Image (tube, helix red, strand yellow):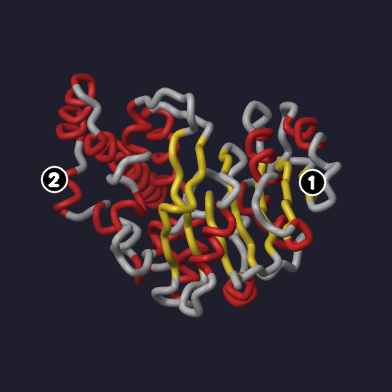
Amino acid sequence: MSWEPTVSIIVPCYNVAPVVERCATSLMALDYPQEKLTIVFVNDGSTDSTVNRLKEFERASNIVLINHEQNRGLAAARNTGIRATPSEVICFLDSDMSVSPDWLRTMLAELSADDVVGVMGDNRLADGLRPNALDRYFYSRWRGARKNRNKHSLGFQWFLFHNTALKRRVIDRVGMFDECITTYGGEDTDLAIRIWEAFPDQLRFTDRATSQHHHQRTVAQFCRAMEQYGYTNLPVLLRRYPQHRKGLAGDWIHSLKGRLVFNCFVRRLVRLACRIYPAPALIRYLVVDSVIRGARRFYETNRLEKRS
């Protein structure tokens, strides 16, 4: 008999009116006992018609809609969802994603093992969307957990919460997301580090629980977001967890190897090469370079401020 715990799926929402209905419709079609499933949508101060779209689904007895009057950030939205339900398993899904009916059971099959406390699923570009240069990197073997799909466990640096399942006891032990992290990136890694340290080698990745991603960005847009992460949140993580400096790529910021690889000369060459052929490896360089540049700018700004 398969494991059928009580499950809550937490979906933070911010200005996702064009896509949130796809997410909600797919979750309502999950092959799972409805009396054991709660779907929590947390509207994080949206200024578009997201709330109105979600209200259409409130008629379902197991759908909960919670509103933040103001935008408080992804960490706060997820924490609101966690507090709203006592389920044995907590799942997280981004509001611009949709899943197949067997998604949850696939997640639980992985999570049911005694030595597993968290499982992250894969994602792919939604059907009908034409991949751009960023998509060809985003959904390639060059990115994140896919590089390590054959390893037994997944490192904290690749464990994200866009398509993820956790046993409730994990949150009870290590705490929730840090709501001080309000800008793009870092809240996932902060929690993943705490989980990793409390439950070593108990995080997994599966490409069988795949979500469809309905949101596209350009390379320039994503690089700007990653540079902001490097400037605002990566230094916070490096200060909190110096023992994980290498895993956080902190060893590339000021080192000789970092200066040789990530500099304006190499950056210009890669950008030129991308105009000819935007290979995933080249896009990956630009993404990582953006993080490093953001972190260097933070430390340089702080150094100048201390001098003055």
Residue 55's label in the rendered image is none
Q: Residue at x 80, y 31 (%)?
A: 52
Residue that carries the numbered disc 1 in the rendered image: 65
Vertical placement of 281 versus 245: above or below? above
The quarter of the picture where residue 83 lies is: bottom right
Tag 2, which secondary structure?
Answer: helix
Q: Is residue 197 visible?
A: yes
Please tell me which of labels 1 and 2 falls first in the chain. Answer: 1
Vertical placement of 63 versus 289: above or below? below
Q: How many marks?
A: 2
Image coords of residue 274 (percent x, y) = 22, 25
Residue 260's label in the rendered image is 2
Q: Amino acid at mark 2?
A: Leu
Left or right placement of residue 97 versus residue 150 in this view: right
Image coords of residue 259 (percent x, y) = 18, 46
Left or right placement of residue 214 versus residue 252 in this view: right
Image coords of residue 116 (percent x, y) = 48, 73
Say which of marks 1 and 2 sits in front: 1
Q: Residue at x 16, y 34 (%)?
A: 266
